[in-house]
Amino acid sequence: MNNKLKQLAVALPFALLSTTVSANWSTTITAASDYTFNGVTQTDSDPAIQASLDYAFESGVYAGAWASNVDFGDDTDFELDAYLGKYVQLNEQVSADYGIAYYTYQGNNSDGNYAEAYTKFGYASEYGQTELNFWYSWDYFGTGAGHVISMIAHTFEIAPNHAIRASFDISNSLDGDKFQWDAPKGDKSYSHYRLAYQTSYEGFGIEIAAEDTSLDYDYADERIVLAISRTFNL
């Protein structure tokens, strides 16, 4: 399961999508101690290797693909996503990022493939970067159910090259007859909390995050996730 962006893990760095940047190719390689989708492990709590290939135009339009290993306890072992969007700097403080993504799961299970539209707003101030993000799917994991994820996040610098990012999101099924997050309880939604420390060293991005959800399952309980990434301009 991925919802890129999904922290996606669809989100590209603002610097890459800025209209002041010339059109270019880039790729990002990430090694993570776990691959989580809104607090739910996608690799049975095992490590993940992930990679993206992106192209950004001067207009702010971007396109790319993202891949990761997964482990759902069946024959699905690989996720491959594609996305197309546009980043717009509305003024010195406010930005918008919108587009569509398509998530596919490679193996014997292709029934879970689905498309998703997203809209993200950013507000930059002397106190940091605030985000308000939304994702909507009309066929969530191929179930035919509508699904919405809403997130609020804030990133602030605690020292040069050291930042804290706090986020809270709610995943909500719009059709509980077709899809529920907690079927035994009849719950159509759950919440996810995440606190991350972010820095960089010698060109590598480093993040250590603590997260938890309101779901009462081992695959969605509290955990610490370490991720190290490196972006290359091609």
Image (spheres, rainbow, N blue to C red):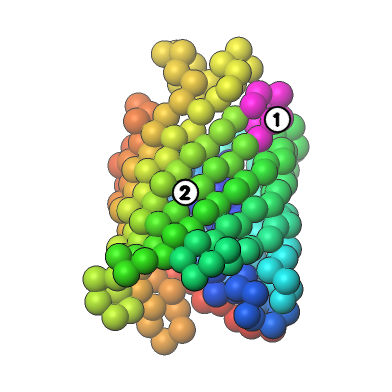
Compared with residue 123, is residue 176 higher up or lower down, i.e. above or below?
A: above
Q: Which residues are magenta?
A: 137-146
The residue sitting at the left extreme is 158
User: Is 29 one of the magenta-colored residues?
Assistant: no
Q: Residue 41 got which mark?
A: none
Please state which amino acid type lies under the numbered disc 1. Asp
Query: Could you tell me which residue is drawn at 56 percent across and 33 percent down?
Result: 148
Query: Could you tell me which residue is drawn at 42 percent across and 29 percent down?
Result: 190
Q: Residue 132 got which mark?
A: 2
Please state which amino acid type lies under the numbered disc 2. Leu
User: Is 145 one of the magenta-colored residues?
Assistant: yes
Q: Is residue 1 left or right of residue 138?
A: left
Question: Is label 2 in a helix, a strand or a loop?
Answer: strand
**Can you tell which quarter of the image residue 2 is in?**
top right
Q: Residue 200 location in percent, x, y?
A: 38, 78
Q: Residue 196 location in percent, x, y?
A: 33, 58
- Which badge, 1 or 2, is on the more N-terminal residue? 2
The answer to whether residue 209 of the structure is visible from this angle is no
Image quarter of the C terminus = bottom right
Q: Is residue 1 left or right of residue 56?
A: left
Compared with residue 166, is residue 72 higher up or lower down, i.e. above or below?
A: above
> Which residue is label 1 attached to?
139
The answer to whether residue 127 of the structure is visible from this angle is yes
Q: Is residue 14 left or right of residue 167?
A: right
Question: Is label 1 in a helix, a strand or a loop?
Answer: loop
Query: Could you tell me which residue is drawn at 58 percent across and 66 percent down?
Result: 89
Depth check, front residue: 216 or 178? 178
Image quarter of the N terminus = top right
Query: Disc 1 vs disc 2: which is toward the camera?
Result: 2
Dot 1: few (<14), some (14–19), or many (≥20) neighbours within 10 Å? Answer: some
Depth check, front residue: 125 or 7? 125
